[in-house]
Amino acid sequence: MNVSSPKPSSTPAGASTPAAVADAHTSSALRARPSTRRSVLRGLAVTTAAGAAAAVLPAGPARAATGPAGPGAGAASGTHTLTLVHLGRDGAPTVAYRTLLTALSGPDAGGGREVRGTPGAVTLEVPAGRYVLDCLISTRPVGEENWGNDWLVRPRLDVDGDLTVVLDARVARPVDIRPPVTDAEFEQIGAFAEVTYEGVTGFVNAMAMSPDLRVAHLGPDTERGAVRTWVDAYWSRPGGVCALGYLFRGERALNGLVRHPAPGDLATLVVRAGVPASGEGPALVSLSPSPGPSPSLSLPIPQGGTGTFLFTPERGTWDLVYGAPTEPEGPSRAYFLLGRSFTPGSTTVHTFDTPVFGPELDASPDAPPVALRTGDTLDLSVPLLADGDGHVPSSPLFTASTVTLYRNGAPYAFRRGEKPGHASFTLPPGRAAYRLTASATRPRGSVTASWTFTSAASANPAELPLSVVRFDPEPALDGTVPPHTATRVAVTVRGAALAAGVRSLDVSVSTDRGTTWSPAPVTGGRVAVTTPAPGGTVSFRARLTDADGNTVAQTHLDAYVTRAAAR
């Protein structure tokens, strides 16, 4: 099990000892932090987890206490004695535990202390203040492989005198979450809580490879809305994953949780894996909630195959990470779809690594500009090789790349070998007419885009008015289309021309690798194309002028291939 990560991960699952359980999440739980900071755990290996319960008793004589001092010993130094007693599901003392105390106020605010596996009662000398206390207690059922896990959270522990806290696994209640499909096999579950007090947030969690997880709230309520709790459970199924997550906010931690969603409560995400020009093995795909850290379960999808995710839209937005096949010694290549919203009962399809590859501009309101002039600096970061669905790879496949800048018709600067569509230039401050040309050669085909615009230095950063043209021939997952077939290819416009308006758009098609070109009028958002013989290619040219006179000229040589006769 893995906490959700920008990079697909497939840490093997397996049972472990309680000590290993504590190692899996202690490093994150100890990091209390200001509430304004969003903590995202990425790539944390997780093993079987345990849980625990707490009840505060009046301070009294030490009960088989172990630790640095007995009750009251720290009164002179401004500390108090906190005594911890751990009981398993059978009510007997246990050493299969991990207890974490995170300070939200007082001199230790933002820090934490951990206790694990010590027999008998344990005493701690702690300063006065507000704390979050959580404890995980593990129980190995007789004749079974997986641990039972009891996790109790006391989101409000005010230490203003000596206390004895009994951590009793018997008060926990079951977490019962089940998908509405019969072919799903449980894989992992994560329960998380954040508690905020006076600007400091403490984070606690329990993660398990066994469905036998029980949870409970201990102690008084916190301030209104101070506790945010979420639970994410994952199942594997043939060719797919079920991801069921639930998010809560209030004054208490959870006392058990039962969720049996109906099919209509879930959204469906279908992921289709194309066949890249290079790279071996399957794609690794993970889907996890955007808000807060979460487990993730990678789904391997063979090239040319399909995978399906069933998940709960009510959890909030979701992040999809598609790890594309790569060469053994090549850089990792991933596609990220972050912060996506879905509705119950919906089905969404995403296809990766199929043509036509070309420039893409993100139309979302919060998308950063891809061409920005700040004073005398021009920064260009156009995704020049987005796939046919518009997904932008972290490391696109290319064999050559150039960017050339012309100023008032004369060559001004040249860049070679950088990431396609990426470059930075220093410009004279005066207004001038510019032409910016970016090109990339792929293992199959090439892409060139050339933009014209006017620009001058200004007091504030200015986004350059770039547009792009997209083509969608709807190829098969291997990137091919049938030969000798009349088709209509969708043509769409992105970027500045959407706001300013399109003055003209001319498209041409070639089936002899650009030797000759035939005009292809755009009618109803499509152009007519008759595909060539088996193994032939289709190329596109486009020239667009927006209403402000800015232009883009694109050439896609060998944009896609017709299916070979052998197929």
Image (cartoon, rainbow, N blue to C red):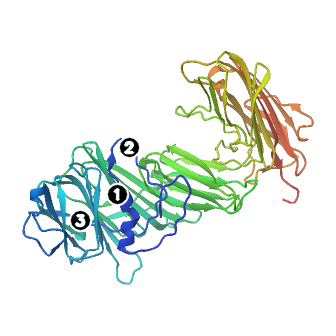
Q: CA distance from mark 1 to mark 3?
A: 17 Å
Could you tell me residue 247's position as x and y percent? Answer: 37, 50
Q: Which residue type does callout 3 highlight?
A: Ala
Label disc, if present, on residue 236 of the rendered structure: none
Q: Which mark is residue 53?
A: 3
At 46% from the left and 67% from the top, the residue drawn is 186
Query: Which residue is more in the foreground, 475 or 179?
Result: 475
Q: Amino acid at mark 2?
A: Arg
> Residue 302 at x, y = what percent?
67, 62
Residue 223 found in image quarter: top left
The residue indicated by pointer 2 is 37
Q: Which type of secondary structure does the marked residue at label 2 adopt?
A: loop
Task: Residue at the far bottom: name it.
Answer: 143
Which of marks 2 and 3 precedes in the sequence? 2
Q: Position of residue 492 (x, y in %)?
A: 70, 33
- Is 357 situated left or right of 50 in this image? right
State which mark lies toward you, 3 or 2.
2
Count residues near mark 2 (Cα–Cα under 10 Å), then give few for <14, some for 14-19, many for 20+: few
The reply, left or right, for residue 238 in relation to residue 491 is: left
Amino acid, disc 1: Ala
Judge from the rendering whether residue 23 lies leftward or rightward of residue 442; answer left or right. Answer: left
The quarter of the image holding the C terminus is: bottom right
